[in-house]
Image: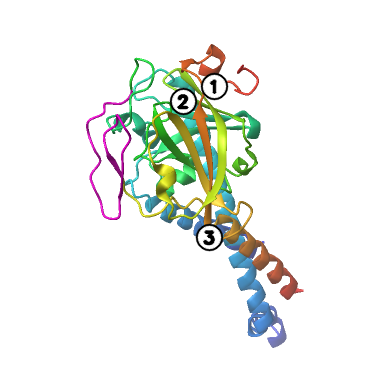
């Protein structure tokens, strides 16, 4: 015959009381909430950065396969800052997440006129601020290589649309947010203006196969 | 152990929800990255001047649809065109801020738990 003490659910009662007492403590509850929120935010940010990186890798793979295809993809390359990314069309927030984005209202990169490319200061254009006068910028498009040289660097207000004006010669304008290392909304924009310095020539075969650009260009 | 698994699952689920929400907020209607990347050629008949070489990607003569708060810019020898935005594109994200908040929250939570 069972003794009453043997079947009484002591452990369960102790455990539930323990849990209840833990959640009655506001400090414990706050700590759980903080850890949960922190973990969600960190996971979200890390996943977003990984997603951007993966999408850009996919684009680079497609670029190497469709160098001479129609419609052609455009690749921006800046050896000084080791930037080598496929340019997306339209500077929507989604495009800017995936890579540098060409403003659709401006000239096509590699053509005569002012081609404007924008990029996030904390991802693809995070080192653009270190570009100086005379640095090389390359545009690869439809199997052709377009060479630009940095000629100006300025900081403007976001409402200053004069940087988008068309020009008579080949020009490339890079836009990113300023201050570069600030966190949060940016009050200004950093503008890099580069001029096309030579007639476009065929891209070297090594470039057409998506090989590192910095070592191969003249 | 079970609580850790539940916590991890919930975290991943919420982060996935955020990513999906961000992806769905794409104004281009879910257009893929490759489609967006190849779009410049579709816009090739925008009024950019022809390139120096013969392989022109552009066909001057058309203009973009005028919109409110647009500026008219013209170049000698080029068709007038409009730039349809009131501001330069926003090129900063809140991701660094979110990451910093997340790290701060994690550290604060771990300290509060001790």
Residue B42 appears in the figure? yes
Rendered residue at 46%/39% (across/down) = A117
Count of labels in the image: 3
Report the side of A130 relative to B25 (left or right): right
Magenta stretch: dominant secondary structure: loop
Is circle 2 on the same chain as circle 1? yes
Give neighbour class at mark 3: few <14, some 14-19, many 20+ (Cα, 10 Å). some
Q: Nearer the viewer, residue A6 or B17?
A: B17
Where residue A110 sits: x, y (%)?
Answer: 43, 26
Task: Specify the segment rendered in magenta.
Answer: B57-82
Where residue A137 sits: x, y (%)?
Answer: 55, 29
Report the side of A192 relative to A90 (left or right): right
Tag 3, which chain? A
Is circle 3 on the same chain as circle 1? yes
- Height in image: A29 above or below A139? below
Q: Is residue B75 magenta?
A: yes
Label 3 sits on residue:
A185
Label 2 sits on residue:
A63
Q: Nearer the viewer, residue A157 or A168?
A: A168
Q: Nearer the viewer, residue A161 or A26?
A: A161
Quick one: label 3 or label 1, which is nearer the N terminus?
A: 3
Where residue A125 sits: x, y (%)?
Answer: 57, 42
Tag 2, which chain? A
Where residue B22 sits: x, y (%)?
Answer: 43, 54
Q: Are marks 2 and 1 in contact (CB under 8 Å)?
A: yes
Q: Is residue A217 magenta?
A: no
The quadrant of the image that shows the N terminus of chain B is bottom right
Say which of marks 2 and 3 sits in front.
3
């Amino acid at each position: 015959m069972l003794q009453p003490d043997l079947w009484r659910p002591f452990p369960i009662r102790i455990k539930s009381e323990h849990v209840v007492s833990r959640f009655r403590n506001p400090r414990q509850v706050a700590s759980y909430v903080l850890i949960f929120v922190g973990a969600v935010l960190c996971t979200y940010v890390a996943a977003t950065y990984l997603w951007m990186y993966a999408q850009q890798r996919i684009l680079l793979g497609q670029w190497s396969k469709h160098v001479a295809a129609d419609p052609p993809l455009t690749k921006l390359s800046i050896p000084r800052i080791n930037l080598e990314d496929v340019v997306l069309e339209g500077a929507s927030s989604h495009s800017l997440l995936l890579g540098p984005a060409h403003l659709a209202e401006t000239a096509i990169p590699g053509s005569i006129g002012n081609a404007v490319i924008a990029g996030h200061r904390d991802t693809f254009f995070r080192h653009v601020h270190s570009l100086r006068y005379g640095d090389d910028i390359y545009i690869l498009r439809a199997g052709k290589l377009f060479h630009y040289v940095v000629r100006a660097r300025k900081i403007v207000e976001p409402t200053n649309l004069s940087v988008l004006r068309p020009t008579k010669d080949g020009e490339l304008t890079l836009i990113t947010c300023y201050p570069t290392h600030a966190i949060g909304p940016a009050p200004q924009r950093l503008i890099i203006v580069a001029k096309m310095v030579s007639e476009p020539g065929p891209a070297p075969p090594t470039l057409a196969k998506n090989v590192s650009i910095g070592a191969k260009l003249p | 152990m079970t609580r850790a698994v539940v916590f991890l699952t919930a975290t991943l689920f919420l982060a996935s929800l955020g990513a999906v929400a961000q992806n769905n907020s794409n104004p281009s209607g879910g257009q893929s990255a490759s489609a967006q990347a190849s779009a410049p050629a579709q816009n090739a008949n925008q009024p950019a001047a022809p390139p120096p070489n013969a392989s022109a990607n552009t066909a001057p003569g058309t203009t973009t649809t005028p919109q409110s708060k647009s500026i008219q810019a013209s170049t000698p020898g080029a068709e007038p065109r409009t730039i349809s935005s009131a501001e330069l594109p926003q090129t900063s994200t809140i991701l660094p801020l979110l990451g910093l908040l997340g790290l701060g929250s994690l550290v604060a939570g771990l300290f509060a738990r001790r």
